[in-house]
Every structure is written in C-alpha cells, then in structure tokens.
Image (cartoon, grey):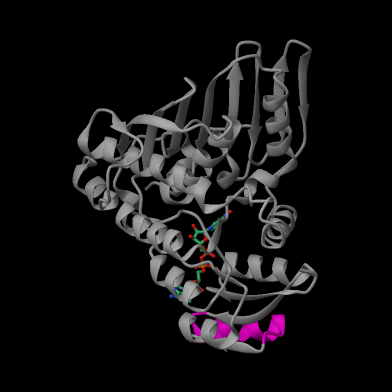
C-alpha cells in the first residue's frame, strides 16, 4: 500500500503526544482522531495535529474515525478495554505502551483479545532504537563476546516503569531465547501507591532455555551508574561472554571489551530519535507480512511473562516456571508479601524518590 494509514491516538499525555507527533511526521500515516478523558487535552492535541475527530471516549472516537492504527498511551492500569475499542474500530494494528499490564489477569485478557481477533499489536519498547543499544546488539550478534553466558540489566527507576524495558532488551541481547524459570526478591512498599504501582526494589535471576543467565535489578537498591547524571537514565544493560562484554548505559553511550581490545561510543536515550524508526516499522509490517515489527506483542508477551513470574516468585518464594500456568493478580500478591520495612538505598540520590 502506498497511501497513508489512518491513526487514532487515545491518551494524549506525554507519551501519547510523542506517538501522535511521530505518526504525523511520517508520510505513511495521518492522525485522524485523538481522545483523552481530559477534554482540554483532547482539544489541544486535535488543534495541534489538525485531527478532525476528537473526544473523551476512545470507543466513540475510534468508531467515528475508523483507523488503520489504534494507538493508546494510558497509565498501566488501562489496557484491555482499549484493546477491545481498537479491535471493534476495525484497526489492523494496535500500538500501546509498556508494560503489557499490571497483572496477568489483565495480561491474559489482552492476549486473548489480540489472538482471537488476529489484529497486529506493538508495544513501545523503543529504547532499543538508540544507537548505543543497536551497537551492543551488533557486537553480541557478531560473536565477538564468544559464548554469551550472562545478560543483565539494572535501573534506578521502579518496576512498572522500568522492568518491562530491562527484560525486553536483555531478551533481545540473548537472541529472544525463551525463559524457563525465574527466582526473585523484593523490598519496600512506598511505590505501591504510585501510578506505576510497584515494590521499591526488586532483584531477579532468569534461567533461559539456551543456558544463559539473566540478572535484573530494578529500583531503590539497584546500583548507581555514576557515569550518568540523569536519574531515570541510570540503567546499565549488557551481555557477558567467554571473550568479553558489551553494555549500554541508557544515558551514557556503550562500551565493550573483546579480544580485539577496549572500545566505546556515544548514544543517549532520546525520544526524538527513537520514535521515528519505531513508527516506520509499523508501516513496514502493515505493508508486508514478512517484516514483523521487532517490538510486536508476541515478543513483549514473553517479557511480560517473565515480569509476572518475578512477581510470583517474590510472593510464593522459590523458583517459578515460565510460561505462566494461568492468570493471577500479581500486584495484589506483591502487596500481601513485601515486608513493611523501609527500603535500603544504594545511593543518596535515590532518597528523593524512595522516601
Ligand atoms: N516507552 C517509554 O519510554 C515510556 C516512557 C514514559 C512512560 N511510558 C508509559 O506510557 C504510558 C503513559 O504514560 P505517560 O507518561 O504518557 O502518562 P500521562 O499521564 O502523561 O498520559 C496518560 C494520558 O492518558 C489519559 N487517559 C487515561 N485513561 C484514558 C482513557 N480510558 N481513554 C483516553 N485517555 C485516557 C490521561 O488523561 C492522560 O492524559 C504508561 O504506561 C507509561 O508506563 C513509556
């Protein structure tokens, strides 16, 4: 198809506007409708984008605009009802924000809706388009690390914000291998009342089917990345092998040590640079079945199962097998289990978030 795909964006806060502007800037898309439960936001976005359809009810806006792509960027608690709205509108692709859901009851609902409708879906794990993320992928894939035995990711930001990203990119560096089991611990209850409800600190091991070990830390106790000033970008994600390692710092480039020596380069997470290729690959997939989007739901679901297995391990203790054996309310299980003791910090800069 050479025409423009029609797009509706629901939830036009920070990420919704990032998406809407990136769709509008791409000649393969036109934003024909916007929606937000906050009417003034919907009106401001419609005026800015020149979108003819606007409103506060996603189902109505999508029904009137009949999009090819239904995109929504709401808080993590709002998922399946908007998937349903997208499917009913006749959209061929639904693009939505991470995490897939806050528990697997909702996650399985989303999966069932998508599987039974056959509608394509894409989840916004767009950091991977950063030049530093791409460079590390290139080094890992080249074989320069020898046999990869460990992939790892840490972030100072908390679970519902960051775990989805950490698991997605470590899985990517590990060739998207299936996970077999996880084991985890968590501490601190402060962020359970946040809009991204989470324990304050979480640490996990992942056993992948190809024998690679995943190590993840997320939140108040995760190690500092002193090379990076911007708090949200204090993330370190990489791979170690028999002949070296390669890693990114989300806000501070990449570095590697391999048999051929020490190397490093730039790159910093940047929405303006990461969104255009993420959006373009939606057009590529809609145009051509043989070009599935790298951030497609099928892949994100595997990461989501790991996230939920991590939560179950905290709640029940011991190892949890993946794939999940059915739905549960993992967030509620975490709330019941995480002890009522103040989280211990890994650095003073965390005190502003983890009071
Ligand atoms: N991929 C990334 O790099 C990244 C970065 C930040 C946030 N996020 C994710 O993006 C999502 C949104 O975060 P944000 O920072 O844009 O939040 P935000 O609060 O700025 O925007 C959310 C918007 O959704 C609207 N909304 C809520 N329910 C709605 C509904 N039923 N119908 C229509 N609109 C509705 C709200 O009124 C608000 O305007 C979250 O899931 C968050 O985790 C992803």
In the rendering, at what x and y percent does residue 132 appear?
Answer: 72, 37
In the rendering, at what x and y percent does residue 146 appear?
Answer: 65, 14
Magenta: main secondary structure: helix
Q: Residue at x 37, y 55 (%)?
A: 107
Mark count: 0
Q: Does residue 352 appear to the left or right of 343 in the view shown?
A: right
Could you say which is closer to the camera, residue 44 or residue 290? 290
Q: Residue at x 36, y 31 (%)?
A: 182
Q: Image height check: is 42 above or below 122?
A: below
In the rendering, at what x and y percent does residue 141 appear?
Answer: 69, 27
Could you say which is closer to the camera, residue 146 or residue 199? 146
Q: Residue at x 47, y 77 (%)?
A: 88
Q: Does residue 250 appear to the left or right of 325 in the view shown?
A: right
Could you say which is closer to the camera, residue 187 or residue 302? 302
Q: Is residue 37 visible?
A: no
Q: Does residue 101 appear to the left or right of 126 in the view shown?
A: left
Q: Image height check: is 56 above or below 92?
A: below
Question: Which residues lie in the magenta part?
Answer: 36-51
Quarter of the picture holding the N terminus: bottom right
């Amino acid at each position: 198809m050479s025409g423009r795909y029609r797009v509706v964006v629901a939830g036009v806060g920070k990420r919704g506007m990032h998406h809407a502007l990136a769709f509008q800037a791409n000649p393969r898309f036109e934003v024909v409708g916007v929606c937000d439960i906050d009417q003034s936001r919907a009106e401001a976005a419609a005026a800015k984008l020149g979108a003819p359809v606007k409103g506060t009810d996603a189902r109505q806006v999508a029904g009137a605009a009949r999009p090819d792509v239904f995109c929504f960027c709401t808080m993590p608690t709002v998922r399946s009802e908007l998937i349903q709205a997208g499917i009913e509108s006749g959209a061929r692709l639904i693009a939505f924000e991470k995490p897939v859901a806050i528990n697997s009851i909702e996650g399985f609902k989303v999966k069932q809706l998508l599987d039974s409708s056959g509608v394509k879906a894409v989840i916004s794990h767009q950091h991977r388009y950063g030049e530093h993320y791409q460079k590390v992928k290139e080094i890992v894939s080249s074989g320069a690390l020898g046999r990869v035995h460990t992939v790892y990711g840490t972030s100072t930001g908390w679970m519902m914000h960051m775990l989805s990203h950490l698991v997605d990119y470590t899985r990517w560096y590990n060739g998207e291998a299936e996970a077999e089991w996880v084991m985890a611990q968590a501490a601190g209850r402060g962020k359970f009342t946040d809009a991204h409800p989470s324990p304050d600190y979480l640490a996990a091991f992942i056993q992948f089917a190809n024998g690679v070990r995943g190590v993840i830390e997320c939140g108040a106790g995760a190690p500092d990345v002193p090379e990076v000033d911007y708090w949200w970008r204090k993330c370190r994600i990489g791979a170690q092998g028999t002949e070296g390692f390669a890693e990114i710092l989300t806000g501070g480039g990449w570095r590697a040590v391999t048999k051929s020596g020490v190397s490093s380069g730039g790159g910093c997470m940047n929405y303006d640079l990461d969104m255009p290729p993420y959006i373009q690959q939606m057009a590529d997939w809609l145009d051509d079945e043989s070009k599935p989007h790298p951030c497609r739901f099928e892949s994100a679901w595997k990461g989501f199962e790991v996230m939920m297995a991590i939560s179950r391990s905290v709640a029940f203790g011991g190892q949890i097998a993946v794939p999940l054996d059915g739905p549960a309310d993992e967030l509620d299980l975490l709330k019941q289990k995480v002890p009522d003791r103040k989280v211990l910090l890994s650095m003073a800069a965390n005190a502003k978030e983890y009071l």
